[in-house]
Image (cartoon, rainbow, N blue to C red):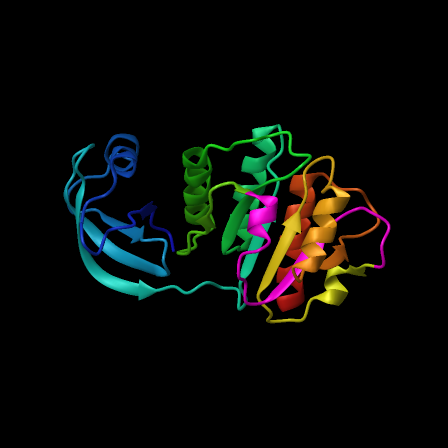
Amino acid sequence: MDKTIFFAPDILTNPELPAEEALHCVKVLRMKEGDAILVTNGRGHFFDASIIQAHPKHCIVNIQKTIDQPKSWAFDLQIAFAPTKNIDRVEWFAEKATEIGIDRFSPLLCQHSERKEIKLPRIEKILVSAMKQSQKAILPQLDEMTPFSKFIKQDFTGHKFIAHCYPQDKKLLKDAYKKGEAALILIGPEGDFSEKEVAEALQNGFEPISLGESRLRTETAALVACHTLHVLNS
């Protein structure tokens, strides 16, 4: 796959690249009418297409072939995490987890959260870029920030885990998880979840887990959890 990949979520109903993608295609890459490009809608499909109107604001394409590209991991993975004060770390995690493979990001507002809000459009751009860079056709779902107590009451079909640092009888994630299971993993803020939040999560069906002996930063713990499940499913 050596063609440049462009993201157009509505390509099947509107054969025009979004403005930012059109600008990159025509102005930066200097592509012109007749050039072949590869487009994804972020929902498991690539489209072989050719440019029929090369305009930096209105780049029109003609779809020539649809290529099914399902996700390369055979399980569903949702990670709910408390965004750190340093937004660069959140963006780093979002980028790397998308490259590895993840289905859903769910930012949490916790008792010890230092960051009370998150700007989703910036994160969404990073997810799109990471999806294209890793040559995937699946764009992860990105949720609005949700208060912890509300989030843990949401329905989830699969195994639910909470990683925390309090003394407790906890299995390692690698021992608690079974290959092929859908998984939801909670990762706390820099000061960890509160003891009340941990108790509340356990009451709502979450299993306590450990990610190892080292005390990890939030974004490191989230990425370790993501990668661990991929290794176990490989």
Residue 175 lies left or right of residue 13; in this view the side is right
Q: How far across and how far down the image is residue 168, in percent?
A: 85, 54
Picture quarter containing residue 43? bottom left
Residue furthest left in the image: 53
Q: How far across and how far down the image is residue 65, in percent?
A: 23, 63
Residue 195 colored in magenta in the image = no
- Toward the viewer: 176 or 114? 114
Residue beneath the point at 27% across and 38% down: 25
Up the image or down, 179 lies above or below 98; here it is below
Is residue 183 at all visible to an observer of this figure? yes
Residue 66 lies left or right of residue 158; in this view the side is left
Residue 159 colored in magenta in the image = yes
The stretch of residues the image draws in magenta is 147-169
Picture quarter containing residue 56? top left
In which quadrant is the C terminus drawn? bottom right
The tally of labels here is 0
Residue beneath the point at 16% across and 38% down: 54
In which quadrant is the N terminus drawn? bottom left
Q: How far across and how far down the image is residue 178, in percent?
A: 67, 71
Is residue 234 at all visible to an observer of this figure? no
- Toward the viewer: 31 or 197? 197
Q: How far across and how far down the image is residue 16, in percent?
A: 19, 45
Up the image or down, 45 lies above or below 88; here it is below
Residue beneath the point at 19% across and 51% down: 50
Residue 168 lies left or right of residue 174; in this view the side is right
- Toward the viewer: 193 or 9? 193
- Toward the viewer: 113 or 221? 113
Up the image or down, 90 lies above or below 62; here it is above
